[in-house]
Amino acid sequence: MVQGFLIKYAEIGIKGKNRYKFENALCEQIRIKLKVLAGEYIVEREQGRIYVEAAGDFDADEVIENLQRVFGIAAISPVEVLEDKSWDAVTKAAGDFIETQYRDYDFSFKVKAKRSDKHYKYTSPEICMEMGAYLLERFSELKVDVHDPDVYIWVEVRDKVYIYSKVYSGIGGMPLGTAGKAMLLLSGGIDSPVAGYMISKRGVMIDAVYFHAPPYTSERAKNKVVELAQLISRYTGRIRLHVVNFTDIQMYIYEKCPHDELTIIMRRYMMRIAEKFAKDSKCLGLVTGESIGQVASQTMQSLAATDDVCRMPVYRPLIAFDKQDIINIAEKIGTYETSIQPYEDCCTIFVAKHPVTKPIVDVIRRSETKLEEKIDEMVKAAVETVEIIEVN
Ligand code: ATP
Ligand code: MG
């Protein structure tokens, strides 16, 4: 069994003087992810990387799987760490380590050495040679290939000796909590969960808001959104999901406004309400799953008409993505299957046959004046009756 995991990070390595903040945030996120697993873990930063020491009854595959959902990690390697730097101990440990990592030895390898302890008795090339010879003798099926090996075996001599070989790729990005918080408009579709994942990948924590229109949208449709929030929270961490009853507002817009403008006006009210919650939750922006041209409400004119009601920045991580690219990410992060379950969405229920595709902001504003009598009251009621679901 391995003793620990060596974690390499990419981008946070270049943050200059603030680097320790990013490293600490990453360590913290790693601790959170490992806390729920069996075993005990000590997470430490050391010289440009992170070392997780594992003890007790842990499952290495499970640890790796969880670490592969932590933003900020470039690569993860199971590692053997030795305090005893005597050459006999090092070679024996390397051989034992290979036994734990590989089922058969039908592969070619190359030893790579790094030596920051300059007093060590062997130089890096000597470590490679001596270790190679030892391994060839111990595992007769192994072959050396210095140009294109199947497997690299790393030996790093620092204050301790680190031996590792397998490299599991991480998901990259920036550690959660290094970039503030944003409010995601989360529907039951394919796009918005991916948008939440994407913004979160840059270190942004998220809360979410879902507009629910009972009885036109069912309890099952709401549960689908809760499930999507749960699925992305495996990456994004805790999400406070605001479920807003939007029915009265939608009906009122339907009654008072031109039907070809329904979608755009409805979306403007969604943004207004989302922004209220965003302010209360100290968010720095709103996030949607929109992408230019995908539907009538996502032309550049429509996006401008929705932005017209927002004072906060609106982030649209998928703005230039093709649908297929979005689907690929949804599949990778495990939201796709849930997203395609066919439950009704409040946007599709009141949708016009021929929605405007190039709304003019002044025209839309004028249409909205028809709502003056009751809309403020309705928005207030929608905000006050919000249901908050803690998703983790
Ligand atoms: P999605 O797949 O995310 O539902 P979509 O392609 O269906 O997106 P629209 O229905 O036009 O597109 O919605 C655009 C964006 O508006 C969504 O990505 C989401 O951020 C937000 N949105 C739409 N409907 C809702 C809703 N009922 N509750 C919260 N946000 C919503
Ligand atoms: Mg949708």
Image (cartoon, rainbow, N blue to C red):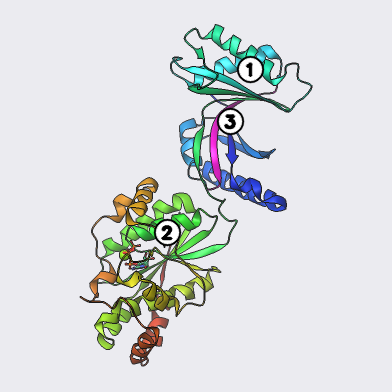
Q: Work out whether residue 87 can be spotted.
A: yes
* Res 256 label: none
| Residue range highlighted in magenta | 71-83
Q: Element type at marker 1? A: helix
The earlier-in-sequence mark between 2 and 1 is 1
Q: Is mark 1 within 8 Å of ligand 1?
A: no
* Quadrant position of residue 31: top right
Judge whether 151 appears above or below 283 on screen. Answer: above
User: Which amino acid, by three-letter code, is at mark 1?
Assistant: Cys
User: Which amino acid, by three-letter code, is at mark 3?
Assistant: Gly
Which SS type dominates the magenta stretch?
strand
Location of residue 152 in the rendering, given as x and y in whole percent from the top left corner: 54, 23
Q: Which residue is mark 1?
A: 128
Q: What distance separates the C-alpha of mark 2 from that of mark 1?
A: 46 Å
Q: What distance separates the C-alpha of mark 3 from that of mark 1?
A: 23 Å
Q: What distance separates the C-alpha of mark 3 from that of mark 2?
A: 33 Å
Foreground pick, 288 / 227: 288
Foreground pick, 192 / 240: 192
The earlier-in-sequence mark between 3 and 2 is 3
Of badges 3 and 2, the one in the foreground is: 2
* Labels 2 and 1 touching (C-beta < 8 A): no
